[in-house]
Every structure is written in C-alpha cells, then in structure tokens.
Image (spheres, helix red, strand yellow):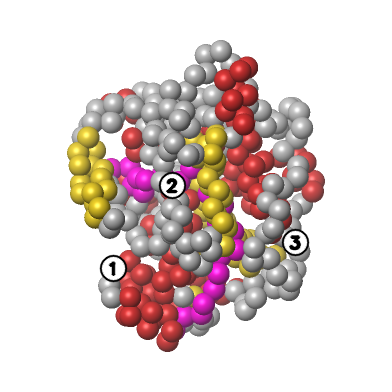
Amino acid sequence: MDATPTSPRGTTSGGRNIVLCFDGTNNRFDATNTNVVKMYSMVDRTHPDQLAYYQPGIGTMPPPGMWGKLKRWFVTRLDLAVAWLLPEHVCDGYRFLMRYYQEGDRIFIFGFSRGAYSARVLAAMLYKVGLLTQGNEELIPFAWTMFKKEQDSELYKGFRHTFGRRVRVQFLGLWDTVSSVGWFWNPKSLQFTANNPIVDVVRHAVSLDERRAYFRQNLWGSRYETTDVLQVWFPGVHCDVGGGYPEAESGLSKLALRWMFEQVKPYHLRFHPKAVAELLPETDTPGEAAPSPVALQHESLAGLWWLVEYLPKPVQKKVGPDRYETEWIIPGGRPRKVPGDAQIDPSVYERIQAVPAYDPPNLP
C-alpha cells in the first residue's frame, strides 16, 4: 500500500506522536468496531515516542459522578439527542493533550461521524485559545467558554498569549463528519471547525450514498493555503465509510480505512505491522473482511428513520459571505448533494461496473 502524497508538510525529526481518536455516535469497542477503533488498534502504542488516546462516541457514557441507572440512561439519551456532553467530549481530549504534550510533539486527531466533529472542535479550540499548561486544569471550563463565544478576536488572542501554548495539528483524519451534532438539535456552528490555520493536513472520507437528513455531510473548507486538504467520496452509507457493521459486512468501510492508512503513512505515524495485516488483508479471511468495492452495501434509511425524514428540519442556508439564515425543510430521504469538483474514489466507478443495481443519482 503505497502512500499517495509525495511531499508531506510539517514532518520533522524529533518529538513524539500524540494520537487522539474520537469514535462515532453511540459507538465504542465491541463486536462492530468502527474505523476509529481499527485505526487505534493499528497504531503502535508500545513505542516510547508515541502516545494514543481513545474516546467512545457521543451517547455512550455519562460523565464521571453520574449515579443511578435511570439517570445514566437519561444522560446518554440526552447526549444523543442534543449533544449535551459535547464540551466534555472535547475537553477530555484537550486535558489529555495538556497532560502529555511537549514542545516538538506531533498531534494526530482521528474521528468518525459526530466524533469527527468533536475532532474538528478540539483542533479549533487549540487554535483559538491555545493549549493550557499542565497544572492549569481549573482553567479548562473558562477556556471552553472563551472558545465557544464569537467575541472580539483581541480577547481570545490575549487569552491565548497569556495562558496558552501555540501548537499545530499535524494530521486531521475524518470519516464522514456529519452536520447534525445532536439528533434533534444542533448547537451553533463553532468557529474554525471548517477552516483552521494550525492544521497541516486534512483527510476526509465522505459517504456518497447516505440519505438520512440527520447525517448530512459536513465538508471541510479551503480558506487557508497552509492546509493540505483532500476530501474523497466513497461508496456506501454512513457506516459503510466509517465502519460499525459486523466484520463480515465491513468490506466497503475497509476501503476508507485503507485509504486513511495510506494517507497518514508519510507523516511518520508508527503502526503495528501485524495489526495492519490482520485488519487490512488482501483477501477475505475467516476473521476479517478485505477492502472491496463490491462488498455488501447497507441501507441506513429504514424503519423509524423514514418517519424522521418527513418531520420539518431547520437548516442553515448561506445568503452572503458570512451570513446564514435558518430555513425549514422536509428532507424526504433525498440524496446528498455532491459538489461538481468533488474527488470521487475509483472504488465508486469499480462498483458501478461490477454491481448492476448500483447507480448513485448524485454523481456530478
């Protein structure tokens, strides 16, 4: 598997690799692992110059101190519905970096679904307020409040200069970031989550065939020339790109996992060769599916999801360079809109040739 980039930017000798992985909605380690878990599994965590952090997805765990089964159940459902614990998800990763980051370290952040949005929020927070030094954990809530408000830039720059360390994100690897952070409510879009001058490389695998309105794509922008951005559309629905189906049904999602692995290799992230060989086999084995453009494609728009498609949904419509208006729509299961200049992975066309029933209506 040869890497496609020819001139990695930001690669330096010395320093350590710090890897943070944010899983998707309601996802955690189990029998149906996502690509986030698989990436974490492939990373060499035994090397002294590499640290790794994994966080289960939104809606899986209540915050520490929550007591009682009913209360825990309510909190996790509230997290699914309105992303109530988004600050905790982001700040836990931020706290990990505070504890372990040293000057010269390289930061890699991976995420899937709403975990991909959490990854982008963490990177945005690192830019806007900087990284607090270890021992200043009491300032994290204040840093979050400073970050989430769209205040005068001089204020947050002053905070960053006084309390924060300037860091860069070497690599931001995303699987199908979605625009709905909560199932039934979306918090205001946070600054620098679509453009971020401290991110060197963005790689984003996007689902071509997902139709659920609450899983609309959330693409990265391209404002800063210092960021190397590549967003590629893959066949399959949301979890056919980010993973989360039984292993025997994961051939499509392995395409996006292999692509991400190839994209990050030039940036000197260390992997376990045995884990890579097991998770990305050349052909199907009894325990692992191989990447395949003709593998089973799932249908996510089923059951109660169809009912949701006929409920009014607020969307933000761009009406000017920096102006948005709320518009209410009836989604109706419409396909995603694919930009005319989108990068389409060759596996899409391979699938079209090999699977007669596969005919995506939204190809540009």
Q: Which residue is mark 2?
A: 219
- Residue at the extreme bottom: 162
- The tag on residue 46 is 3
Q: Image point 29% across, 55% down: which residue?
A: 321
Q: Residues in magenta? A: 163-184
Q: Quadrant of residue 329?
A: top left
Residue 246 in view (yes/no): no
The quadrant of the picture occupied by the N terminus is top right
Q: Nearer the viewer, residue 345 or 285?
A: 345
Mark number displayed over residue 150: 1
Question: In the rendered structure, which disc, 2 or 1, sits on the residue that comes first in sequence?
Answer: 1
Q: Measure how far apart labels 3 and 2 are at the Cα level.
A: 34 Å
Q: Is residue 19 visible?
A: yes
Which amino acid, mark 1?
Glu
Q: Nearer the viewer, mark 3 or mark 1?
A: 1
- Tell me the number on the disc at residue 363: none
At which x and y percent is residue 199?
A: 53, 63
Above or below, 127 against 136 in this view is above
Along the horizontal axis of the image, is 29 left or right of 214?
right
Residue at the image position 75 percent from the left and 45 percent from the top:
2
| Marks 3 and 1, how far apart at CA | 41 Å
For marks 2 and 1, give the CA distance. Answer: 21 Å
Q: Name which residue lies at 62% across and 77% down.
A: 102
Relative to residue 291, is residue 63 depicted above or below?
A: below
Give whichever of 5, 83 is nearer the camera.
Answer: 5
